[in-house]
């Protein structure tokens, strides 16, 4: 395909998959259960943080997370005491366990009670370019409290070579427009043009088949390469093509 043909093809696929019917098969369904801004962004951050592996398992674990937070994540984050976290014992999603979950509760409480919340933290850290440095700075703040060393692996750092798929997915959810009924468009200071595609097995494989990506590893360098390719097709909203690449891989075995 020529570049124009490829762009038109991916535009069509993006429009097809970015629709409310996508929600029922995706972890984004968890934050869609809420209407309060803070409930949406906290549940989205937590579900995105455990979004690796089987999607059904991710969704089921996300529901368990919300139940442990009494289905009021913002209220729980702001007001919980250490003793309220005792019933997290036994929680596990792959390598994310109760110890990790308890620290995430403490870190989010610190962010919401002293730093103005997740949106404010990202706005303060953001520059005018992509979000790689911003994510690095966010991670530093997130782990500024005493924490288990093991828990650090659950927030990726692009400046240490990671594609940071999960946190880029969270940012897509928060920043991109809600017009299509999938993403939320809650954060208005950050721009869709600053976002990076959540690079996973599906998006990476399809991007290579379509010659949008040459690098074989799904790492930070591959993400920057894919960013450049997608921005050539749409510099204003490049991450809309995530729906096309993911859909072609996950649903069409392209």
Image (cartoon, rainbow, N blue to C red):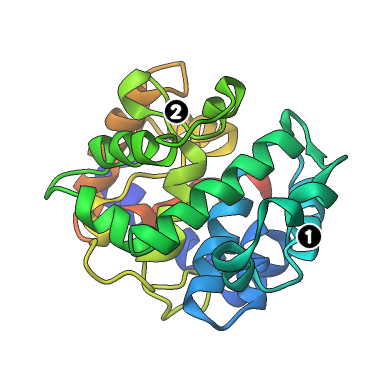
Q: Provide residue 4's location: percent of width, then percent of height.
A: 26, 51
> Which residue is situated farthest in the top direction here?
216
Q: Is residue 111 left or right of residue 91?
A: left
Location of residue 148 with respect to 248 vertically, above or below:
above
Q: Is residue 239 left or right of residue 243?
A: left
Residue 43 makes an appearance in the image: yes
Q: Residue at x 20, y 49 (%)?
A: 126
Q: Provide residue 225's location: percent of width, then percent of height.
A: 28, 29
Camera-side residue: 16 or 135?
135
Q: Is residue 94 left or right of residue 175?
A: right
Camera-side residue: 34 or 196?
34
Q: SS class of the residue under badge 2? A: helix
Q: In what quadrant of the picture does the C terminus appear?
A: top right
Question: Which label lies toward us, 1 or 2?
Answer: 1
Q: Provide residue 99's location: percent of width, then percent of height.
A: 71, 34
Marks 1 and 2 sit apart, C-alpha to C-alpha, by 40 Å
Tag count in the figure? 2
> Which residue is situated farthest in the right direction here?
90
Q: Which residue is mark 2?
A: 208
The mark found on residue 201 in the picture is none
Q: SS class of the residue under badge 1? A: helix
Q: Residue at x 78, y 60 (%)?
A: 68
The mark found on residue 68 in the picture is 1
Q: Based on the displayed image, in which of its 4 quarters is residue 149 positioned?
A: top right
Location of residue 173 with respect to 7 vertically, above or below:
below
Q: Based on the displayed image, in which of its 4 quarters is residue 89 positioned?
A: top right
Q: Residue at x 56, y 32 (%)?
A: 154
Task: Identify the mark nearer the N-term, 1 or 2.
Answer: 1
Mark 1: few/some/many CA within 10 Å (<14, 14-19, 20+): some
Q: In what quadrant of the picture does the N terminus appear?
A: top left
Q: Provide residue 251's location: percent of width, then percent of height.
A: 68, 51
């Amino acid at each position: 395909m020529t570049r124009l043909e490829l762009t038109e093809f991916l535009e069509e696929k993006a429009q097809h998959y970015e629709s409310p019917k996508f929600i029922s098969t995706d972890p984004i369904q968890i934050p869609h259960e809420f209407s309060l801004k803070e409930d949406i962004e906290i549940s989205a951050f937590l579900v995105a943080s455990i979004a690796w592996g089987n999607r059904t398992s991710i969704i089921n674990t996300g529901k368990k997370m919300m139940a442990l937070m009494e289905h009021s994540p913002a209220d729980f984050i702001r007001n919980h005491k250490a003793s309220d976290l005792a019933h997290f014992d036994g929680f596990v999603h792959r390598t994310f366990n109760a110890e990790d979950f308890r620290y995430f509760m403490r870190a989010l409480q610190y962010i919401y009670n002293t730093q103005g919340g997740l949106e404010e933290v990202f706005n303060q850290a953001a520059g005018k370019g992509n979000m790689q440095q911003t994510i690095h700075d966010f991670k530093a703040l997130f782990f500024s409290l005493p924490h288990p060393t093991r828990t650090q692996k659950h927030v990726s750092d692009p400046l240490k070579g990671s594609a940071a798929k999960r946190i880029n997915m969270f940012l897509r959810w928060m920043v991109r427009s809600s017009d299509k009924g999938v993403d939320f468009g809650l954060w208005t200071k950050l721009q869709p043009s600053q976002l990076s595609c959540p690079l996973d097995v599906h998006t990476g494989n399809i991007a290579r088949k379509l010659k949008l990506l040459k690098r074989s590893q799904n790492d930070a360098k591959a993400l920057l390469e894919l960013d450049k390719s997608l921005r050539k097709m749409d510099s204003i909203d490049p991450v809309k093509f995530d729906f096309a690449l993911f859909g072609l891989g996950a649903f069409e075995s392209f």
